[in-house]
Image: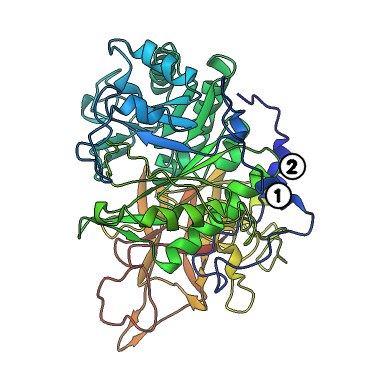
Amino acid sequence: MKKTKTLLSLLMASLMGLSLAACGPDNPDGGSTDDGSGSVSIFSRPTVERPAEGRKDWNDVDSFVCYYGSLTGPSEETPVFGGEPRVALEVLKEFDVAIIHGTQIVGVENSREMIQELKDAGTYVIAYISIGEDDRLRTADGLGGGGYASYYIYENGLPKQNGNWGTYYVDGGNPIWQEMTLSRAKEIMDYGVDGLFLDTLDTVDVAYDTIGGMIDLVRRLDEELPEGTKLVPNRGFTIFPYISQYVDGIMFESFYTDWDAAAQVYKDRSEADLEWNVNVACNVINAARRYDYMPVFALDYINVSEYGYMPQEVYNIVWQYDFIPYCTYDRQLHICPNPGIKPTSKRGELALSMLNEGGGEVTLNGDTSAANLAYADNGLVTVTVDSTFQGYSGVKPLNDGFYATKENHDQLNWATEAWASERNQNRDHWIQFTFSSPQDISKVIVYWAVDSGTLYSPRAARVEAWINDAWTEVATFSWEQGSDYLVQQQLTEFTFAKVTTDRIRVVQPKGMGDGTSGRLDGQETTNSGLMWVSEVAIYA
């Protein structure tokens, strides 16, 4: 474990300009391998042979497997490369790191002995635990909606479910959930594993206001588990800059491939998706690793019909970012094939290829005077939102004194220029400003976000004030003005009769985003379920 040895202030300074552009430079695989300081050399590490006895140093590992099946079961029912099925335990020994599921060891006969057997063979054993979702509904303290536990994230009075897996989102900062998680973690560690694979940290993107609690939970795991415990989060890019001091690695699941639920097949990521991932690799993960190196594990999925040739391509690509590759053909991870290959590309040559050092430093163009009640440095307001699109830097851009225009928009820094909600057609999106004391308010100006030269003003929006213990509509906007449409608006100004309140929020009704010139028929679009804002100003 790292405790607090990382110089967090130095790390955060380096991450001020997260470069997470979905539509950045034309060549995501190009660029220099050196950021000017020569620091990229840390990502071009020589590979280290496995010792005859013992294990490699943790930072020297260069192979891993992720497997959630029984240690005594077959690695594959029908081996893709032919031959007889092999026992999973024997296949796991062939990797430097084996990520297994906690349910496959807790209470399982001889699991301690099998884990020790893996370690003796030179393999680090990391066990799965979910820290941001619950696999079932529980009552616990019964203080939540419907008599369920208070630690769930609630929607319409009931725990919000992850429809992809049937699990339930939780608030990582809830004391009851934290104690349950710590107890479970200690129980798993008691079986002799080297560390924990922390899954479902991306819950903070569903409920951004839980980010502090999730960070605190990771900190407690680091501090309260035995010294030397390895903590490896799965994704969690939104909070990685804040938890990197507590963890010992990270997994980038689905870096190169993605699951097509409609077609029920795996597919290569789109150019835009891959570019987004490359920017995360360079500007979130590797920007931090320059100061505190740790292994990164890249897990990708391939159709079984392509498994004989596709892994080599994937291995070569992710290796260029100094990520350790592994490919499987089972989304449930109930098999553990070993393709028996090594990357042939140059390790780490693209690790900082899209690094935007010093990005996000802009000349303020918004109202930073005392008259703007929303401006952060005036110290009057706390900002919360209904959700945050994965990869964005949170609520800070909403009142930092800068708004993006078509002229000043820096495509590489969209994640620090604006806030975006999650993409959801079926719910309202909102930004709430809570004041330290009641304010007289009569005007709200919303500056909409820019992407690739397009201003993403909405089709409809409204302003609400908290009056008499209820949200009251005080002003509305519609892009439809008779036979005309207000498309690509830089800003929308809401004026209304003065109200005295300690809470104001801007609401975009469900499905009413994406007021662009090409969408005049009201049909749903890719971004009509997205609220996209660069800055908000509020006045008396």
Give the x, y percent position of residue 161.
26, 40
- In the rendered image, the vertical position of residue 245 relative to residue 258, given as above or below: above
- Find residue 129 and report its image quarter: top left
Q: Amino acid at mark 1?
A: Ser
> Marks 1 and 2, Cα distance to the nearest angstrom?
6 Å
Disc 1 crowd rating (10 Å Cα; few below 14, some 14-19, many 20+) is many
Residue 538 left/right relative to 207: right
Residue 94 left/right relative to 243: left
Give the x, y percent position of residue 225.
52, 16
Q: Nearer the viewer, residue 115 or 164?
A: 115
- In the rendered image, the vertical position of residue 513 relative to residue 336, given as above or below: below
Residue at 24%, 21% in the rendered image: 139
Q: Nearer the viewer, residue 69 or 479?
A: 69
Q: Which mark is residue 14?
A: 1
Query: Does residue 130 show up?
Result: no
Disc 2 crowd rating (10 Å Cα; few below 14, some 14-19, many 20+) is few
Question: Quick check: marks 1 and 2 in contact, CB under 8 Å?
Answer: yes
Query: In the rendered view of the protein, which quadrant contains the C terminus?
Result: bottom right
Q: Amino acid at mark 2?
A: Leu
SS type, badge 1: helix
SS type, badge 2: helix
Please name the residue that numbered disc 2 is placed on: 10
Give the x, y percent position of residue 510.
29, 61
- In the rendered image, the vertical position of residue 484 relative to residue 149, given as above or below: below
- Find residue 356 and report its image quarter: bottom right
Query: Does residue 162 show up?
Result: yes
Query: In the rendered view of the protein, which quadrant contains the N terminus?
Result: top right
